[in-house]
Image (cartoon, rainbow, N blue to C red):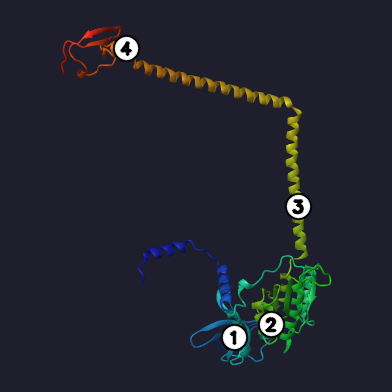
Amino acid sequence: MSRDFPALETETASAATARIWTVSALCRAISDTLDARFNPVRVTGELSGFVQAASGHCYFSLKDDSGQMRCAMFKRAAGGLDFQPRDGQRVEVSGRLGVYEARGELQLVVERMVLAGEGTLFEQFLRLKAKLEAEGLFDPARKRPIPTHVRGIGLVTSLGAAALHDVVSGLARRVPHIHVVLSPAAVQGAGAAGELCKALSTLYTLAQSNTDTDKNIPVIDVILLVRGGGAMEDLWSFNDEQLARMVLASPVPVIVGVGHETDFTIADFVADLRAPTPTAAAELCATTQQDWLDALDQLQDRMRSGVTRMLDRQSQRLDLAAVRIGKPSGVVSGLRHRLDSAHQRLEHAVHRNLEQRRHRVQTAELRLGLLDPTLVLSRGYAWLTDARGVALTRVNQLHSGQSVGARLADGSVELTVQSVRDI
């Protein structure tokens, strides 16, 4: 066991400052993590405690020798069962892991259930998903944002699909000013994947022009690929590898809205944006007309406020200029006051400078006076010089009988050396 107590103290301090979660927020965070890490999942096990409520929803557990998991299968999915589930049956289910917040329990929401050995489609789905994911087709860094200003929308779906009505109605309500180009294709059946690819290719040709100079060629900035809900077999054309690569090749962002919120297809993972339903795809593809009108109103208010503030500032400046122009005497008086102040400061500076210089001269005079040799002579000393006027300061400069001059404080005398003695 590690004895690294400083590290333990650091971890304890970090824990003390960690985020404090609410129970519901933590449940949602765990659910989101499970969704990103595992979903969709496929599980095999034995049915236990199977109950179908009056609402049509089914509740049960899946178990094996060493574990069990709570499951829920809602009415829509339960309606697609082709057998009557009962305890003890071994089944294969596909669905999504999550957290049931009311009880804080791990729960598997089952979308499809078959007797063990009948899940071949889901196996194909997982194999293709793993292959394309390894190739980077699902990489978030590759996905493009939806344009803010969409000029035209491409739509791929079936002419007989309810999704067509939902999308067209939503777009007409939200963005009636944006034109929509429909490229129809079958969304179910043996040849549906090929038709979907062909329909997308048609829109790609239009989108690659992306010019509104020719009014006969519509501009397409985003493409919607949609269909309504159904069983896994009904949505299988959207799990086609060729279709996935066709979605990847789009020159403009693609939004895929297939099935219900819990339905996932390969096309969803490749798309630039996945919509939970066809109606949601219509809502995500463009900003509503009313939002743009509201934004314009806000800009108009900001411009009006800005112009008003600018006019107010300029009016104040104009008022101040008018006051100055209207009373020139005030300006002259102010300038005279400034001139008088400057004159007083100059006189003071000159006087201070003269005083400083006078003091320096007096100090120099005093120092020079202290150096006057007569002050030394007045204390009884004499200044001796030879006949040439050279100062005599040492004994060896003198000899007996030599004539020397002596300067005293009040005059000078001529002297003759009688004898020379060293000190």
Above/below status of 95 relative to 14: below
Under tag 2, what secondary structure?
helix
Measure the alpha-carbon separation of dots 3 and 1. 56 Å
Amino acid, disc 1? Arg
Whole-angstrom CA distance, mark 2 to mark 3, is 48 Å
Residue kind at label 4, given as amino acid type? Thr
In this rendering, the label closer to the viewer, 2 or 4 = 4
**Residue under circle 2?**
243
- The structure residue drawn at horizontal position 71% and vertical position 67%, both measured from the top left corner, is 147
Is disc 2 in contact with disc 4, using a CB cutoff of under 8 Å? no
Q: Which residue is mark 3?
A: 301
Please tell me whether mark 4 sits on a helix, a strand or a loop: helix
For disc 4, the marked residue is 374
> At 48% from the left edge and 61% from the top edge, which residue is drawn?
17
Amino acid at dot 2: Leu
Position of residue 271 relative to residue 149, above or below, is: below
Disc on the earlier residue, 2 or 4? 2
Label 2 or label 1, whichever lies nearer to me, is: 2
Asked if residue 97 lies left or right of residue 303, the reply is: left
In space, the residues marked 2 and 1 are separated at their CA atoms by 16 Å
Q: Which percent across, then down, holds residue 65?
A: 49, 88
Instruction: Return the disc, 4 or 1, that comes first in the chain's sequence.
Output: 1
Which residue is found at the position 57% from the left and 79% from the top?
A: 38
Of all residues, the one furthest to the right in this rendering is 216
